[in-house]
Image: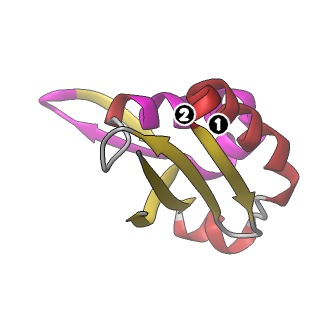
């Protein structure tokens, strides 16, 4: 069993400098609990980033689980999404949106 630790910050640099994640602490925790259930070890929210620790049979967390985790935060924290979401357009693919990016990942 591995413990995967990932650190996230807002992808939008302006928003990252001007928005505190502390008011969204409960939303981030609830989204992590909903997504990872018993595999969630901890969630620590700081002003400009948050850290999740998840137990996993592999050395990484499935991409789909992380995407759904982010979607749950974005859906629940609509005021954060309105101010910080980044939209990517591409003629060959549907528009995609991103709220957070992983800036550090480790496995213990």
In the image: residue 55, left or right of residue 17: left
Q: Nearer the viewer, residue 93 or 42?
A: 42
Q: Residue furthest right?
A: 23
The label shown at residue 107 is none
In the image: residue 57, left or right of residue 94: right
* Label located before the other in sequence (2 or 1): 1
Image quadrant assignment for residue 75: top right
Task: Give the residue displayed 36% in from the left and 29% down from the top.
Answer: 64
Give the magenta part as a residue range. 65-93
Q: What secondary structure is marked by label 2? A: helix
Task: Give the residue displayed 57% in from the left and 31% down from the top.
Answer: 36
Screen quadrant of the C terminus: bottom left
Query: Where is residue 77 shown, x and y percent of the image?
Result: 74, 36
In the image: residue 18, left or right of residue 23: left
Q: Is residue 97 magenta?
A: no
The label shown at residue 69 is 2
Query: Where is residue 39 shown, x and y percent of the image?
Result: 56, 35
Screen quadrant of the N terminus: top left
Task: Give the residue displayed 16% in from the left and 32% down from the top.
Answer: 91
Category of crowding for the residue at label 1, using alpha-carbon neighbours closer than 10 angstroms: few (below 14), some (14–19), many (at least 20): many
Label 1: which residue?
A: 32
Q: Please, is residue 22 above or below residue 67 in the view?
A: below
């Amino acid at each position: 069993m591995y413990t995967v630790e990932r650190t996230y910050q807002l992808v939008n640099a302006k928003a990252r400098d001007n928005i505190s994640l502390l008011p969204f602490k409960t939303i981030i925790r609830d989204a992590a609990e909903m997504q990872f259930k018993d595999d969630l070890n901890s969630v620590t929210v700081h002003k400009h980033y948050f850290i999740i620790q998840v137990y996993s049979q592999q050395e990484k967390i499935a991409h789909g689980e992380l995407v759904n985790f982010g979607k749950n935060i974005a859906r629940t924290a609509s005021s954060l999404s309105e101010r910080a979401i980044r939209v990517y357009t591409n003629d060959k693919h549907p528009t995609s949106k991103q709220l957070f990016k992983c800036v550090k990942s480790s496995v213990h």
